[in-house]
Amino acid sequence: MLNVPAVALSIGALYHTRRWLESPKASPAWRHLYVGAVLAVLSILTYLTSCVVAVIAGIWLVVERRWDLLWKRKTVLVLVLSALALVPWVLVVLKFERSRSVWATGTADHVSHLLNWPWMYYLRRFPELFGAHLLLIAAVGIAAGLAVRRWRHETLLMLLLTLICYGYYSYLPAKEGRYILLLSLPLVIFCLFGLLTIATYLGKLLGIRPNWAKATTLLMVVSLFIGQAWLTSRVYVMSISGYKELVKYIEKIAPDESVFYDGKNSGIFTFYIQSRDPGYCRRVVLGQKLLYAEGITSSRHEFVSSAEEVVERLQKRGGCQWLAIADSPDSPPSEAAWSLRGAIKGPQFKLVKSFPITRTKTNGLEKTDVNLYQFLLPVQQADEVDMPYFSLGEGVRFKVKPIQR
């Protein structure tokens, strides 16, 4: 997941932006602007939705009233260079991933339904994402931050960051908990304010000297950190095993041949094939490309509708004598996928071996099989393949050359 490095880069960009905005008017800290701009650009290049960093930085500039910095020649130059650095990325996205650009910008339809949009989605996920205990400590920190004068400015800036991020990510059509990891930044700061407040009041209540109160705060921070590390170790992480053994067996019996795969976890299977092939001379043909494909509106295009058509397509366009096929097709299943599973029962295919695949779930283990078949008919090797890319549009096609053995 690229969310984690993108968040790290975003936090670095915001930190250096703050250092630049808070530098003296007589001698602005331009080095922080340069570093912040580089980190912001890298963050956006790492993950699309990191562009919210630019919005946060702009609003911070308005709140800090640093108009003097905005009109400086160096500031304009940095903004122009940053925009130019993103131009190639924008062109690539618009050409090859136009449908995904909606994730970062939304659509006119979203704007027209703002009142009915699921604005409570992330609010309901907060306890799961951050933990009720951290949210409670952060609430104490927000109250203390607004009450204590020396913390008030920092609290307001972090609240602005929280509101901007929450509004932006709630507006986007794609929603997952990992998208709002940037909110961990204000959460940590609010929790520190909360711990400082709790330690201070405990010190006054118990008659502890101020120096001891500081030591108590440090002890609370360390204890909370250790507790979070323990909770992290108990977080469920899905794991799937069995594909490594399957790929090793294929390497043994067909070290230089192409392999067809259909079913769930095609990415895992392809990863093992390619990670164990440093020369990049082997290839994987996917059922979701050869027999069917997804459209830009999630509609499915079927290229075959019977077992006979499956055999003919595998023979003329597949180029594979070996087929790894999961028991159940990918979800949602297609007519072409079921036709494939009907075809492999015929005399043109020989079952070589079955490999158990185990997937850990919160409620136990899920077991299935991936069956390795040998296609007994001769296959044609294509020098060039005309492939439709429905994710880019209904009429988009590219001619590609397969990896040669």
Image (cartoon, rainbow, N blue to C red):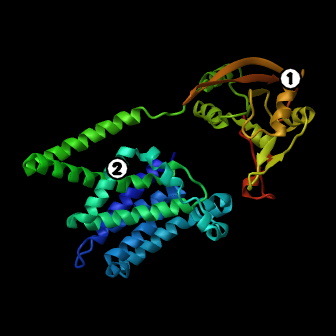
- Observer-nearest of 108 and 293: 108
Q: Is there any visible trace of residue 337 in the rendered image?
A: yes
Q: Please name the residue that numbered disc 2 is placed on.
A: 136
Q: Separation of disc 1 and disc 2 at Cα?
A: 59 Å
Q: Report the side of 399 relative to 120 (left or right).
A: right
Depth-wise, is mark 1 or mark 2 nearer the camera?
2
> The residue tagged with tag 2: helix, strand or loop?
helix
**Residue 217 placement (x, y as % from top left):** 19, 47
Q: Which three-letter amino acid code belongs to the residue tagged 1?
A: Lys
Read off the residue under disc 1: 345
Which quadrant: the C terminus? Answer: top right
Taking 5 as reference, is 56 above or below it? below
Q: Which residue appears at 81% of the width and 58% of the height?
A: 395
* Residue at point 41%, 77% (across, down): 76
Residue 328 spot, x, y in % from top left: 74, 30
Mark 2 Cα-neighbour bin, 10 Å: few <14, some 14–19, many ≥20: some
